Image: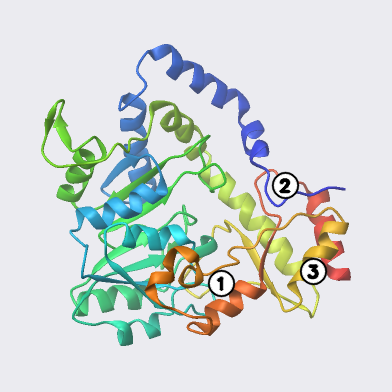
Amino acid sequence: MKVMPNRMDRGFFMYQKEFEQKALEVLRSGWYVLGREVEAFEQEFAFYTGARYCVGLASGLDALWMAFRILGIGSGDEVIVQANTYIASVMGITINGATPVFVEPDEYFNIDADKIEEKITDRTKAVLVVHLYGQASNMQKIVQLCKKYDLRLVEDCAQSHGACFQGKMTGTFGDIGCFSFYPSKNLGGFGDGGAIVTADAQIAADMKVYRNYGSEKRYYNKVVGANSRLDELQAGLLRVRLAHMQELTKERRELAERYHERLCNSRIQLPGVRKQADSVWHQYVVRCEERQELIDYLNVHEIGTIIHYPIPPHLSEAYNYLGYQKGSFPVTEHLADTVLSIPMYNGMTKEEQDYVIEVINRF
């Protein structure tokens, strides 16, 4: 049996008729940019998250860098962020000329809230929280710190659609929550897409202007903006999947629970979930000191895996100028050497998961 690390086609076939009907509806409408589908999706996604406002954008990265731009964070400013995130999180900071200040993760792969305060300086303007792999971060302490030091709080929710901390959904704790709708996400489209959510009417209004060339009225440009619009087709298709998010999340949680219960190998460490938090299991990430041997073994048995992520941002070539060396963040670097995402996707069959469990347990 061959098992891929992810299968996006399964998610399409689950609701194929609805997707195809919506695609034809949009194509026949004759309106393809900033129309009724985008407006409806923004309202529905805001309601889903519990936010007051949502603004659809072209990608998750755009959501990040535009969030900091709208908040006025730039050259000379520092933004605290976890060291073990995907590099797009850091790009959202540096595209604006600001400096990322890295913090090691906790045992749940998210930023260690107990290590944030020691990194705050006079130049610190914001904290960027990344809800990695689909699990909500320790938001109670982070919100308290941001209030104490008058810091902006931005959330990277690219992997946490629907995840909650103390019953409140990720993306709604800070000034701006940033989402990606890349096809592999829990709420994925069929191309690039993103959005921000916020409780601030002015931030929402400014983001709508900025995403459309800085124009509130056609050909009248208030600022030098960007071209970052969620298109009508993606918005329509996302509305279809959003209507099924409860059942899609339930399925992923059931898959994760079966892994928890049945994976049993002393060489492999399973992921945990923080008290008062939950996970939507964007990835099921195990740890193994003999990771390459495990990967090779699984490849022989035609089980695909992905490393999220093999090179921490502070060691990437893109950020050589920050001056970090190997050993700067040992916890992060050890995770980069040991984490492995095993197959997890909507539409995964019991037979496929049983096979993965059986093979891993024999490693």
Question: Which label lies toward us, 3 or 1?
Answer: 3
Around disc 3, counting alpha carbons within 10 Å, would you say few (fewer than 14), some (14 to 19), or many (20 or more)? Answer: some
Judged left or right of residue 212, residue 31 is right
Of residues 245 and 71, the one nearer the viewer is 71
Say which residue appears at 63% left-offset and 72% top-offset: 271
Residue identifier under label 3? 294
Give the alpha-carbon distance from disc 3 to disc 2, as whole Å: 21 Å
Give the alpha-carbon distance from disc 3 to disc 1, as whole Å: 24 Å
The C terminus sits in image quarter: bottom right
Residue identifier under label 2? 348
Residue 96 location (% of width, % of height): 27, 58
Name which quarter of the figure residue 235 lies in.
top left
| Marked residue nearer the N-terminal end (3 or 2) | 3
| Marked residue nearer the N-terminal end (3 or 1) | 1
Residue identifier under label 1? 273
Say which residue appears at 21% left-offset and 62% top-offset: 73
Of residues 197 and 310, the one nearer the viewer is 310
Say which residue appears at 24% left-offset and 35% top-offset: 212
